[in-house]
């Protein structure tokens, strides 16, 4: 109750026209949500992400996994509360999610593309569309599933990761971790 009162007082003290996130700040309960409510830049990122997510749902109402992906993203964003650089983590989470939604919506031009034939699955190629974005990203399509992955540190080659997905290419061969299955693939 005291927390709600503090949030209400802070809301009243905001300058007129101050940015508000897409959710009701009087109903927030998580540390990250409070941070977004109190930071105009994060609130702006939240509104942009919410607008793009709503547009994605409207464009693909049959995409049954869209809400699951959004819930996973929200959980990952909220995990930023346990990091040393909480604000930077939250901002990065929003920026990556916005970029992911832009890529899925076809708003970012493809820089390069590749098709991979994976051992034991040559009839079902994996495709990768690479983007010169910030951060660099790839849209991986395999077995009728699409995943946006982001560049990750590697000793050599190009490595991209997302939840339970990893594409690591080096000199024309790729290692593809796809939801628990490890595949060795060659570029076609």
Image (tube, grey):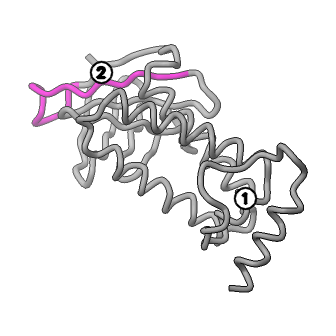
Residue 11: name its quadrant. bottom right
Q: Nearer the viewer, residue 130 or 72?
A: 72
Query: Is residue 100 located in the magenta-colored stretch of the structure?
Result: no
Task: Give coordinates of residue 27: x percent, y percent.
Answer: 60, 68
Q: Residue at x 79, y 54 (%)?
A: 39
Dot 2: element? strand
Task: Give coordinates of residue 22: x percent, y percent.
Answer: 61, 48
Dot 1: element? helix
Pair 2/1: label in front: 1
- Given the current orientation, which residue lies at the most extreme bottom position? 1
Labelled disc at residue 4: none
Q: Residue at x 50, y 57 (%)?
A: 74
Q: Which residues are magenta?
A: 117-131
Residue underneath mark 2: 187
Query: Is residue 130 located in the magenta-colored stretch of the structure?
Result: yes
Q: Nearer the viewer, residue 124 or 72?
A: 72
17 to the left or right of 140 = right
56 to the left or right of 150 = left
Task: Give coordinates of residue 175: x percent, y percent.
Answer: 33, 39
Q: Give the crowd class for mark 1: few <14, some 14-19, many >=20 residues within 10 Å.
A: many
């Amino acid at each position: 109750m005291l927390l709600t009162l503090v949030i209400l007082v802070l809301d009243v003290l905001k300058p007129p026209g101050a940015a508000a996130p897409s959710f009701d700040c009087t109903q927030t309960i998580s540390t990250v949500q409070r941070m977004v409510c109190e930071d105009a830049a994060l609130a702006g990122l939240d509104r942009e992400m919410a607008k793009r997510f709503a547009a994605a749902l409207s464009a693909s109402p049959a995409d049954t996994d869209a809400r699951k992906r959004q819930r996973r993203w929200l959980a990952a964003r909220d995990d930023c509360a346990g990091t040393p650089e909480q604000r930077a983590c939250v901002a990065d989470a929003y920026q990556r999610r916005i970029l992911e939604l832009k890529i899925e919506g076809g708003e970012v031009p493809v820089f390069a593309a590749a098709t991979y034939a994976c051992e034991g699955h040559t009839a079902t190629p994996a495709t990768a569309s690479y983007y010169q974005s910030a951060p660099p990203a790839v849209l991986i399509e395999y077995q009728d599933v699409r995943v946006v992955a982001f560049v990750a540190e590697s000793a050599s080659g190009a490595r991209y990761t997302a939840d339970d997905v990893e594409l690591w290419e080096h000199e024309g061969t790729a290692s593809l971790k796809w939801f628990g299955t490890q595949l060795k693939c060659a570029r076609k």
